[in-house]
Amino acid sequence: MSRDAFRPAFEQLPASLPIFPLANAVVMPGCQLPLNIFEPRYLNMVFDALGGDRMIGIVQPEGDAGPDQQQVLFRVGTAGRISLFQETDDGRLLIMLSGVCRFAVGAEIPTTRGYRRMVVDWGPFQVDYDDIESDEGLRQELLGSLRDYFAQRSLEADWESLERLGTRELLDRLVAGLPISVAERQMLVETVSFSQRLLRLNALLKCEILPAAGSCPQRPQ
């Protein structure tokens, strides 16, 4: 896949990451995620990251935590590098994360700065650094399903720009941006194989188009 000049090499990825739990948000490799940071613990997280490798892990929570409970997180997240930040007059930070690689969540590391930090395993997702050639037929099938999906919902898109995207960039942008459920997005994030992820997303789009979408076997329960 295409590399930006500041993306760390796979062997340079850190052994642990500060974790930002965020439902229905991922930063897939090569994509970007804007964030508005205002909680003190996450301001600490960003400032600490800026003083180090600039890396932050985004992990979806499995559900709502009680008032005295720690959020339970899914076991796979996406990591991004802070590529842009801006301070505001009211004490917020506006940052842009540029996606680097997915990771598996490991043990939690005790911290004193309010935010969570976890050991991470990048190994299963080294494929995020591989150059991948996709089947043009599968690409066109995905675009066809996407057109039907948008038409059914009376949504508009810049199809000329979408057609110009490489298949991997198109796929990962859709994984991050489509209005799908937390469980569906997580299923796609956890699918290691590029081709399998493409097939599953295409199947999910077809499920949304079908009248009996609720019985779709590709939809996670």
Image: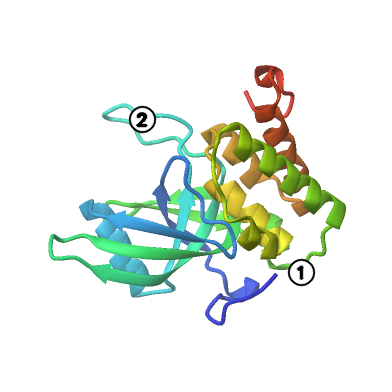
Residue 6 numbered tag = none
The residue tagged with tag 2: helix, strand or loop? loop
The residue tagged with tag 1: helix, strand or loop? loop
Taking 71 as reference, is 194 left or right? right
Residue plotted at (67% across, 21% down): 213
Depth check, mark 2 against mark 1: the one in front is 1
Quadrant for the N terminus in the image: bottom right
Quadrant for the C terminus in the image: top right
Question: Which residue ends up furthest to the bottom in the rendered image?
Answer: 5
Q: Dot 2: within a 10 Å radius of its alpha carbon, few (fewer than 14), some, or many (20 or more) residues?
A: few
Taking 175 as reference, is 84 left or right? left
Decide if residue 72 is in sight here.
yes
Give amino acid for label 2: Ala
Mark 2 and mark 1 in contact? Answer it, CB < 8 Å.
Answer: no
Give amino acid for label 1: Asp
x and y percent of residue 25 in the render?
47, 47
Q: Earlier in the sequence, mark 2 or mark 1?
A: 2
Check the image and report above or below for 12 versus 147. below
x and y percent of residue 86 in the render?
27, 70
The quarter of the picture where residue 4 lies is bottom right
Q: Dot 1: within a 10 Å radius of its alpha carbon, few (fewer than 14), some, or many (20 or more) residues?
A: few
Decide if residue 123 is in sight here.
no
Residue 131 numbered tag = 1
The residue lying toward the viewer, choosing from 12 and 101, is 101
Q: How many numbered callouts?
A: 2
Q: How does the figure colour the protein chain or chains?
A: rainbow
Q: Which residue is mark 2?
A: 65
x and y percent of residue 140 in the render?
79, 51
x and y percent of residue 175 in the render?
60, 47
The quarter of the picture where residue 88 lies is bottom left
